[in-house]
Amino acid sequence: MRAIAVLCMVEVHTAAIIPPEGISVGHPAAFVAAAFGGMAAPMFVAISGWGIHMSAVRRVAGPDHNARTWLRWLAPRILLLSLCQLLVNLLLSADRGGRFEWQTPGVLTLLAIGALLAPVLIRLPMRSRALLMVAMMATPLALGDISGPDWSWWERVGSEGSSEWLARLLWNGTYPAVPWLSFVLLGSLIYDLADNPTARERGIVLGLTATTVTAAVAAFEEIPWALTEGEAVLTFFPASTAFLVVSGTFVLLTHRALEESEVRGDEIGGSKRLAFLEPAGRITLTIYVAHFAVLGAVASAMQGEPRLDLVPAFAATIVHSLVWIPLAIWHQKYIPEISFESLLRKISQSSR
C-alpha cells in the first residue's frame, strides 16, 4: 500500500505538470485524474502516519526508553523530512516553470509535524485518537475564510515573513497541519485496528453512508460533487470536511481491498500478488523526491511550449508513474544503501 500511495502521488504530480490540451472539468479524463488526486495524498499521509506510529510504538517498547532516546529518534526524521521538502521545492521551483516557491511547506513538512507529535499521540488511548481525528476533520467548518477558500495557487504556496510561512504550515497552505493531521491519526488507528476487523468494517460503513450524503447534497444543491478548488461539496484546496471524510473512507476501503487477512510484518495490507511492489514500498521517500527531479526538468523544458494532446500526455503520465516499479526493483538489488531511507537509518544509528 505504501508503493501504491507514492505511485499515485507520482501520477497526480505528472498530470499537473503535463496537462493535456483541451480537457475541461467535465471531461472523463479530468474526472479520473481528479479521483486519483483526491486519493493519492490522503493515502500517502495515512500510510506515512501508520509508519510513524509503528516506529514510535517500537521505540516506547525498547529497553532504553527516555527523553534522550526520543530526541535521537525525532531529530533525524524531522531534519530529513524538512530538508527533503526544501529539495522538492527547489527541484520544481516556480522560477524554472514549476509549482512551488522555495519556502513552501508541503506534505513532507506535514509528516515532520506528525513525527514531532508522535511521542504524545502514542500515549493517547485509541478512542481519544479517534475523537481527535473526527475533531480535526471538522476543523474546516471552524476555519472559514482563514483557510483561504478563494485563494489562487500562488497565494497558497507563497509567503512573506515567518508569520505567513507558519500560517501556511498550520492552516492555509497546501497540506496544513490543520486539518491534514487527521490522516496521520487515521494511519495510527489502522495500525491499532489490525486485529479488530469488525471496528474497521464499521468505520467503512459509516464513511460510505457519509459519502452517499455528500453526493445527495451535491445533487440537491446542483453544485459539483468534487473539485480541486472552487464551489463544490468536496474541495482539496482547502480541504473541506466532506473531502476529509470521503477520502478517509476510501483510504480504509483501499486498505481493506489490499489486505488478505491482516496487517503482517512491516507491510500494511501485504499480499503475495503485489510482491513486485515491495521494493518501491521500501523507498517511498526516495521515489517521492526523485520524481520531482524528473518533473522539474520537464517543467523547465516545456516553458513556452504548447500542451501535449490527450493521448501523448496520458501515455507520458502512465509511463512516468509505472517506471518507478522496475527502477525500485533494480535499486533494491544493486544499490539499496543509496536512498533517503538508508540515510535515515544510518543517522539514527550513529546518534545512539
Image: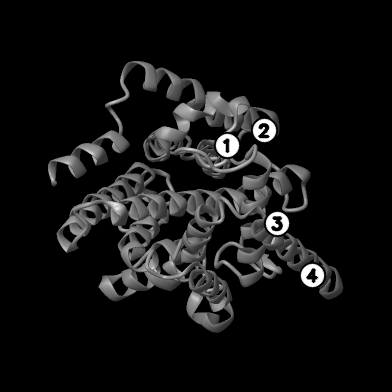
Mark 1 touching mark 2, by CB under 8 A? no
Disc 1 to disc 2, C-alpha distance? 9 Å
Name the residue at 61% across, 55% down. 196
Type of amino acid at the residue the image marks with label 4: Val
Q: Is residue 138 left or right of residue 30?
A: left
Residue at which label 2 appears: 309
Q: Position of residue 82 (x, y in %)?
A: 28, 53
Type of amino acid at the residue the image marks with label 2: Asp
Type of amino acid at the residue the image marks with label 3: Glu
Disc 1 to disc 4, C-alpha distance? 41 Å
Disc 4 to disc 3, C-alpha distance? 19 Å
* Front position among marks 2 and 3: 3
The vertical placement of 229 against 256, above or below, is below
Is residue 227 visible in the rendered structure shown here? no
Query: Which secondary structure, mark 1?
Result: loop
Q: Earlier in the sequence, mark 2 or mark 3?
A: 3
Residue at which label 1 appears: 306
Q: Earlier in the sequence, mark 4 or mark 2?
A: 4
Disc 2 to disc 3, C-alpha distance? 42 Å
Looking at the picture, tell me which residue is in the foreground, 60 or 148. Answer: 60
Looking at the picture, tell me which residue is in the foreground, 36 or 213. Answer: 213
Tag on residue 213?
4
Q: Hey, which residue is sitting farthest front in the picture?
A: 63
Residue at which label 3 appears: 201
Q: Position of residue 269 (x, y in %)?
A: 57, 40
Disc 1 to disc 3, C-alpha distance? 48 Å
Q: Earlier in the sequence, mark 1 or mark 4?
A: 4
